[in-house]
Amino acid sequence: MSRHDEQRQADGGSRFRLRTRNGRSTRLGSASGSGTTRNPRPSPLPHIAAMTWRDGAFIHWPVDPDAIRSRVPEPLEVDTYDGKAWLSVLPFVLARAGLRGTPSLTRLTTPELNVRTYVRYRGDPGLFFFSVDLGSQFVAEAVGRLARLPCHHAMMHVGGADERVAFSSSRTPDVESDARFSATYRPDGEVFYAEPDSLAHWLTARRRFYAPSGRGRGILTAESAHAPWPLQPVELTVHENTMFEANGLPEPEPEPDEEPVAYYCGELSMTGSIPRRISRPQVR
């Protein structure tokens, strides 16, 4: 068994074929190594939001950290695993999102597509989002204002049968962006929970994000709370993905016969905290 096969078996990763935007097919692969995902201390601010992740996939590609360093604002640092930075694309359904304790009739459900990487702030691990596409314009505007995330309204469709999910996303026509993603996927194995310090845990366990607070006023952060991710191996075909190009990011260049690292999660409920500013710019 090769080193990559050992890592894939340990982390529950899956094999699949990726179709690039020009119609060619290529094999991509996982990385291996060691790392730690010590979560920072919980925020003292209350968790006012509640939501449920449904029918989603984690798809991860290793990249040279120098290739994305300029796209991550200071004072955040690009985090690495086995010397590699990682870019992730996450298609899923954001279900029953709203204020905690409110009736279900007031909650919203919409598809969501995230493009993100892994960072540290003063040693604490977290996520940095390059883009958050949502099927609801109202939710996109609300989340963008509240959390200072780069949210976009996109035309999205989620369907499928027999546990297979068909997910597609394209930015609205009035936006000058060639941001498209289309994939089909389904669970392909038993549920597992990532072991601490494994690649699967490093890629999925982070519960805090960092974002510029705007107008040079430092860094905002917010966090989620939930049970460990019930991950499954995934059978996945990516039909089209222009999200890296749309975000000014490099296309991952894997070694021959390597694949992205991918997982499936059917459902997980969580809460979210109020965003708070944790860094102020230095006065000179």
Image (tube, helix red, strand yellow):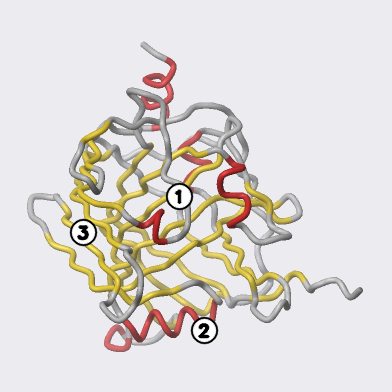
> Which quadrant, please, contains the N terminus?
top left
The correct choice, above or below, for 220 with respect to 244 in the image is below
Q: Quadrant of the C terminus?
A: bottom right
> For the residues carrying marks 2 and 1, which lies nearer the camera in this image?
2
Q: Residue at x 45, y 65 (%)?
A: 131
Instruction: Please name whichever residue, 174 or 140, is drawn nearer the observer in this view of the structure.
Output: 174
N-terminal label among 2 and 1? 2
Circle 2 residue: 145
| Other-residue count near label 3 (Cα within 10 Å), few / some / many at <14 / 14–19 / ≥20 | many
Q: Looking at the image, which is closer to me, 30 or 222?
A: 30
In the picture of the structure, the residue carrying the numbered disc 1 is 228
Residue marked by disc 3:
167
Tell me where residue 212 sits by quadrant. Answer: bottom right
Give whichever of discs 1 and 3 has the lower sequence position. Answer: 3
Q: What is the secondary structure assignment of the residue under circle 1?
A: loop
Relative to residue 136, is residue 30 depicted above or below?
Answer: above
At mark 2, the secondary structure is helix
Relative vertical location of residue 47 with respect to residue 84 in this rendering, above or below: below
